[in-house]
Amino acid sequence: MFENYKIEKILFLDIETVPVASSYQKLTPEFKEFWEKKSIQFRKENQNAEEVYQRAGIYAEYGKVICISFGMVYLKEAARFLRIKSINGDDEKIVLNEFAALLNRLNAQNDLLLCAHNGKEFDFPYLSRRMLINGIRLPSILNVAGRKPWETSFLDTMEMWKFGDYKNFTSLNLLSYLFNIPSPKTDIDGSMVAKVYWEDHDLDRIKKYCQNDVLALTNLFLKFRCEESIPEDKVEYAE
C-alpha cells in the first residue's frame, strides 16, 4: 500500500504546541475551572490541576500552535531531495493563517496529501480546531467533517505501522531507531517544548527540533516503501 502514493505530492509535517498561558496562575478563573474538569480525567489522586498544567499544550482547547514544520520531496538530476520550511512565532493566528494559505495554494489541484506521525489523532485535528478558534476558514484539505476516513487526504505513519493493531502506540523516535534513522530527539523532546518556549523563549531551538521530526518522518515513510533514506546533504532548509 505504501507504494500507491506519489511521494512528490505528500506534505510531511509536524507541529509544536504549548499551553496557552505560561502558568496556571495566569489563567482566568473560568479557564481554571475548565482545566480543573479536564485534568481530573488523568491526574493522580494526590495531584491538583495546577500540578498537571504542563500537559495543557497537547489539548487544542487549552494550548496553541507555535511552530509548524513541513517538507516535500523533489527530484533533481535523478536524486531525491527534501526541502523543509517552518512557520513559527508567538502570534498563533499569524502562524495558522500563513499555513492555511500554503495548504490552499499547494492543494489547488486537489491532489495534495498530508502526512504526520499520529497525525490523525493529533496534528490534523489540532490544526483544524485552532484555526476555527482563531477565526480562520479551514482549507478544504482539513475540512473533513462528514467525510469517511478513506475520503480524506491524510496519511499517518503510526497508523500504517499498526497494521490493524489499534491498541498499539509506537513513537517516531522508536521507529527511527528500529529503521536506523538518525534520532529526531538529539537536543530536546516533546516534554521540554513548553519550558523552552515559556522560560527560554527559544523559538529557533524549537524550530530545529520540529524540523528534525519532519526529516525523520519523511525517511520513515521511505523505509516503509523499502527505499533509501534522504541523507542530510540532500536536505534543504528554506527561510
Image: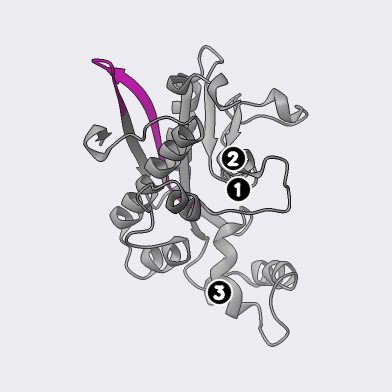
Residue that carries the numbered disc 2 in the rendered image:
124
Residue that carries the numbered disc 3 in the rendered image:
24
Looking at the image, is mark 3 or mark 2 earlier in the sequence?
Answer: 3
> Residue placed farthest to the top in the image?
109
Q: Position of residue 192 (x, y in %)?
A: 42, 66
Tell me the quarter of the image containing the N terminus: top right
Q: Position of residue 76 (x, y in %)?
A: 26, 17
| Alpha-carbon span between mark 3 and mark 2 | 26 Å
Residue 112 falls left or right of residue 39: left
Identify the main secondary structure in magenta: strand
Residue that carries the numbered disc 1 in the rendered image:
122
Assign a secondary structure to mark 1: loop
Three-letter amino acid code at the position of disc 2: Phe
| Alpha-carbon span between mark 3 and mark 1 | 23 Å
Tell me the quarter of the image containing the C terminus: top left
Q: Quadrant of residue 148?
A: top right
